């Protein structure tokens, strides 16, 4: 192996470092070559000189050569010891690829860990929302009023509009199909039954999950990133009592009210099409609507709101507490919360449909 030797000047700074780099660059540094940098005459060295030395090491590494430092002493030796890790060539060996069983095991453990955290959150949230106030352990009633206004009052317009438009669409589509058989009046029954059982609950819950669920996840995730959660714990406050319980109780109270408004709005949308387009008298249309409003359908629709409210709040809080990183992590967890909310809504709706139609039906 051939050896090339270069002498370092008495002071290694920005200017002398550039000169040293140009000297090395002009040399024939190739494989099986050892570049020896002699620091015997060097008495002083600063960080800019060290940066040029790192650049020389990168150049030598690309040429598959070896860099060797000799003769350093005193302050120069101390500084070289600090930058020595940057002078070492990067390992060319790539990380071994994980096998199928390793990947499966890692993901399984990750799912189990997240499931355990979510279960603990559910237990704590239910305790601080329902049991703790009954035991006299306190509740943030002033925050509850603010949450009810934010989750309920400010969502009325969008919930009513979405359900009204959906009722109009359902009536429009069903009228076209029933017109051929002369049973257009039964469109009122279809709209009423559909909104009482399914449409009002699921549409309202989707709107609330996109609006409130995302806001909950973003709020808690931002507090976690800015270390406000740790500050609350450091002050001896229970995070679930302070943050989760008011949100959970607020949505449990407002979501049934929003669903009731959704049913009224959906029926109003269907009535608009039945009266204005199909030509039915308002008294006839609304009488048909009320006659098709069965108690079991309304019970089915309102029972869903309890599960939907629990899921939306707990999933939003769960993803907010699990955030990592900065603003990008907040965005990712907010998106994840909304996706998980909608998946939860569809899954729970399937379970309710199976129970009511195949077990209780």
Image: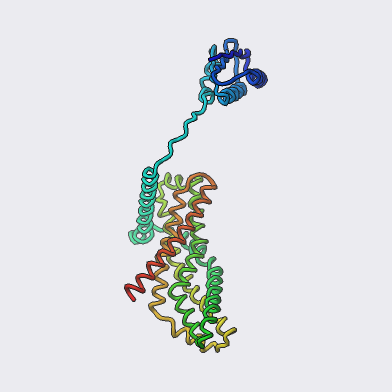
Note whether 209 is above or below 36 in the view shown: below
Image-quadrant location for residue 103: top left
Can the viewer see residue 265 in this picture? no
Depth check: 80 or 92 in front? Answer: 92
Circle count = 0
Q: Does residue 92 appear left or right of residue 134 in this picture?
A: right
Q: Does residue 42 appear left or right of residue 178 in this picture?
A: right
Q: Position of residue 94 (x, y in %)?
A: 47, 34
Note whether 175 is above or below 337 in the view shown: below
Q: Name the residue at the top extreme.
A: 41
Residue at the spot 52% in from the left edge and 25% down from the top edge? 89
Residue at the spot 55% in from the left edge and 68% down from the top edge? 158
Q: Position of residue 149 (x, y in %)?
A: 51, 64
Q: Position of residue 263 (x, y in %)?
A: 48, 75
Note whether 156 is above or below 127 in the view shown: below
Residue at the spot 52% in from the left edge and 67% down from the top edge? 153
Q: Position of residue 269 (x, y in %)?
A: 55, 78
């Amino acid at each position: 192996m051939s050896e090339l030797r270069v002498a370092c000047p008495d002071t290694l700074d920005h200017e002398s470092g550039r000169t040293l780099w140009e000297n090395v660059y002009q040399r024939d540094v190739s494989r099986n070559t050892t570049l020896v940098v002699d620091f015997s005459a060097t008495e002083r060295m600063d960080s800019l000189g060290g940066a040029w030395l790192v650049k020389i090491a990168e150049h030598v590494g690309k040429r598959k050569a070896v860099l060797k430092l000799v003769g350093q002493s005193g302050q120069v030796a101390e500084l070289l010891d600090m930058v020595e890790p940057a002078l070492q060539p990067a390992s060319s060996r790539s990380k071994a690829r994980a096998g199928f069983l390793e990947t499966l095991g890692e993901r399984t453990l990750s799912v189990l860990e997240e499931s355990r955290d979510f279960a603990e959150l559910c237990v704590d949230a239910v305790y601080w929302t329902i049991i703790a106030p009954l035991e006299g352990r306190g509740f943030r009633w002033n925050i509850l009023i603010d949450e009810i206004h934010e989750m309920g009052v400010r969502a009325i317009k969008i919930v009513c509009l979405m359900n009204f438009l959906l009722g109009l669409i359902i009536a429009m589509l069903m009228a076209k199909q029933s017109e051929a058989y002369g049973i257009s009046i039964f469109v009122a029954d279809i709209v009423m039954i559909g909104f009482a059982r399914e449409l009002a609950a699921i549409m309202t819950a989707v709107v609330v999950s996109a609006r409130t669920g995302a806001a909950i996840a973003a709020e808690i995730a931002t507090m976690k990133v800015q270390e406000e959660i740790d500050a609350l714990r450091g002050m001896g406050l229970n995070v679930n009592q302070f943050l989760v319980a008011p949100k959970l109780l607020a949505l449990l109270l407002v979501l049934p009210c929003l669903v009731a408004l959704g049913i009224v709005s959906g029926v109003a949308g269907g009535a608009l099409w039945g009266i204005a387009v199909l030509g039915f008298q308002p008294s006839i249309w609304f009488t048909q609507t009320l006659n098709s409003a069965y108690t079991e359908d309304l019970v089915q629709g309102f029972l869903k709101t309890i599960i939907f409210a629990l899921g939306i709040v707990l999933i939003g809080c769960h993803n907010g507490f699990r955030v990592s990183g900065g603003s990008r992590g907040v965005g990712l967890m907010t998106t994840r919360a909304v996706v998980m909310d909608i998946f939860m809504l569809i899954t729970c709706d399937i379970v309710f449909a199976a129970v009511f139609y195949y077990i209780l039906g």
